[in-house]
Image: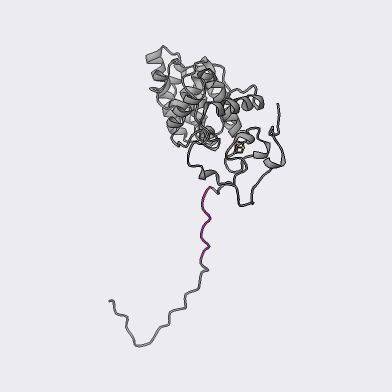
C-alpha cells in the first residue's frame, strides 16, 4: 500500500497560489471519461485501497439497510454508536415493524431527522414483513419501493450483503470525486451512476464504488483534497487545483454610524404627509 503519488516528481508538487491552476469547478466537461482512463484509475485505487468494506457495522442485510437509512445526513462513525442498542431491541424486520415510534425516536435521536427516520424505518419494516416474508428483497426494483430507500441505499445493501451488482453507489463522496477525476459533469446522482456504470466493468461496480467512497472520505476531501498524498494525482485533471471556497466571501459590512439625536423644537407640531 502506497501513500505517495506514483510520479511524485517536482512537476506534481502543489501549484496552489501560482495562479495557473484551474479551479475545480471550471472543468466544464467530462474530460477523461474513457474506459482506458478508468482502468488506469481503478488500478491505482486498488493499490491504495486493496481491502475496503462498508464502514457501517452490520451482520446482515437487515442491519445494513437500517444503518444506511440512519446514516443519511450523518456519519458512519456516529451511526455505529447508535445501532448496537437499536439492533438489540429490534433484531429483525418483524420486531422493527412493531416498534413504538416514540421509543424508536429516543434510540435514534442522535442520527438527526430522527422523527422522519423512525417513520421510514417502521414503514420499511412493515412492508418487508407484509410483502417479502420479513426478508430484505434482493432486487433493485423491490428495494426502491421500500420507504426511505433510494438507489444509493439499495446499491449499498445489495452489493455489500448479497454481492449483487445492480449499480454503483453514488453518495456525497462519489458525487464530488468523480467530477474531479473528469469522469462526469453530472450533478444528479442517478445520472452520475448511469455514466459511471457505462465506464466501469460490471464485475467491479461494488468494489470500485467502495474504493471511491473511501478515497473521498480520506484523501479527496471536500474542502482541501490531499492531492500531495493522492496516488491518482498523475491521472487527475483537478490535481492541485485551487479549491474554491464553499461560499463567496461576504461583502465587507458598512461601519455603523450613530444617528444624530432628534432635537425637539418647541412650538412646532409634526404633520403626517
Ligand atoms: S489528485 Fe486531488 S483532486 Fe484529484 S482525486 Fe486526488 S485528491 Fe482528489
Q: Is residue 82 visible?
A: no
Looking at the image, how many numbered discs can be counted on the residues? 0
In the figure, residue 142 lies in which quadrant? Answer: top left
130, 53: nearer the viewer: 53
Q: Quadrant of ligand 1?
A: top right
Residue 190 drawn at (x, y percent): 43, 30
Which residue is at a point 45% across and 37% down the rendered structure image?
187
In the displayed image of the protein, which residue is found farthest to the left?
273
62, 234: nearer the viewer: 234
In the displayed image of the protein, which residue is found farthest to the bottom?
267
107, 57: nearer the viewer: 57
Which residue is at a point 51% across and 50% down the rendered structure image?
247
- What secondary structure characterizes most of the magenta part? loop
159, 230: nearer the viewer: 230
Q: Is residue 96 shown in magenta?
A: no
Query: In the rendered image, which quarter contains the C terminus?
Result: bottom left
Q: How is the image coloured?
A: one colour
Residue 200 drawn at (x, y percent): 52, 24
Q: Report the magenta residues as a range.
A: 246-253
Query: In the rendered image, which quarter contains the N terminus?
Result: top right
Which residue is at a point 57% across and 17% down the rendered structure image?
59
Residue 76 drawn at (x, y percent): 57, 30
Q: Is residue 164 visible?
A: yes
The answer to whether residue 217 is above or below residue 206 is: below
Residue 141 drawn at (x, y percent): 39, 19
In the image, taking residue 50 as reference, residue 244 lies left or right, namely left
In the displayed image of the protein, which residue is found farthest to the top?
133
Amino acid at each position: 500500500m502506497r501513500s505517495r503519488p506514483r510520479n511524485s516528481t517536482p512537476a506534481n508538487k502543489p501549484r496552489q497560489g501560482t495562479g495557473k491552476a484551474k479551479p475545480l469547478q471550471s472543468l466544464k466537461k467530462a474530460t477523461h471519461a474513457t474506459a482506458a482512463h478508468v482502468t488506469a484509475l481503478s488500478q491505482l485505487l486498488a493499490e491504495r485501497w486493496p481491502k475496503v468494506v462498508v464502514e457501517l457495522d452490520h451482520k446482515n442485510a437487515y442491519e445494513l439497510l437500517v444503518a444506511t437509512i440512519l446514516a443519511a445526513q450523518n456519519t458512519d462513525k456516529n451511526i455505529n454508536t447508535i445501532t448496537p442498542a437499536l439492533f438489540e431491541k429490534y433484531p429483525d424486520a418483524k420486531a422493527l415493524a412493531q416498534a413504538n415510534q416514540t421509543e424508536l425516536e429516543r434510540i435514534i435521536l442522535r442520527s438527526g431527522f430522527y422523527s422522519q427516520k423512525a417513520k421510514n424505518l417502521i414503514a420499511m419494516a412493515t412492508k418487508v414483513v407484509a410483502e417479502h416474508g420479513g426478508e430484505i428483497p434482493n432486487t433493485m426494483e423491490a428495494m426502491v419501493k421500500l420507504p426511505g430507500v433510494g438507489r444509493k441505499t439499495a446499491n449499498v445493501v445489495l452489493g455489500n450483503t448479497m454481492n449483487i451488482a445492480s449499480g454503483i453507489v453514488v453518495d456525497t463522496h462519489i458525487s464530488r470525486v468523480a467530477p474531479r477525476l473528469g469522469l462526469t459533469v453530472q450533478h444528479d446522482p442517478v445520472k452520475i451512476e448511469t455514466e459511471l456504470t457505462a465506464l466501469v466493468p460490471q464485475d467491479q461496480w461494488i468494489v470500485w464504488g467502495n474504493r471511491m467512497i473511501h478515497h473521498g472520505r480520506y484523501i479527496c476531501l471536500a474542502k482541501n483534497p490531499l492531492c500531495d498524498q493522492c496516488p491518482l494525482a498523475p491521472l487527475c485533471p483537478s490535481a492541485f487545483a485551487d479549491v474554491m471556497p464553499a461560499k463567496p466571501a461576504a461583502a465587507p459590512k458598512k461601519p455603523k454610524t450613530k444617528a444624530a439625536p432628534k432635537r425637539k423644537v418647541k412650538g412646532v407640531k409634526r404633520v403626517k404627509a
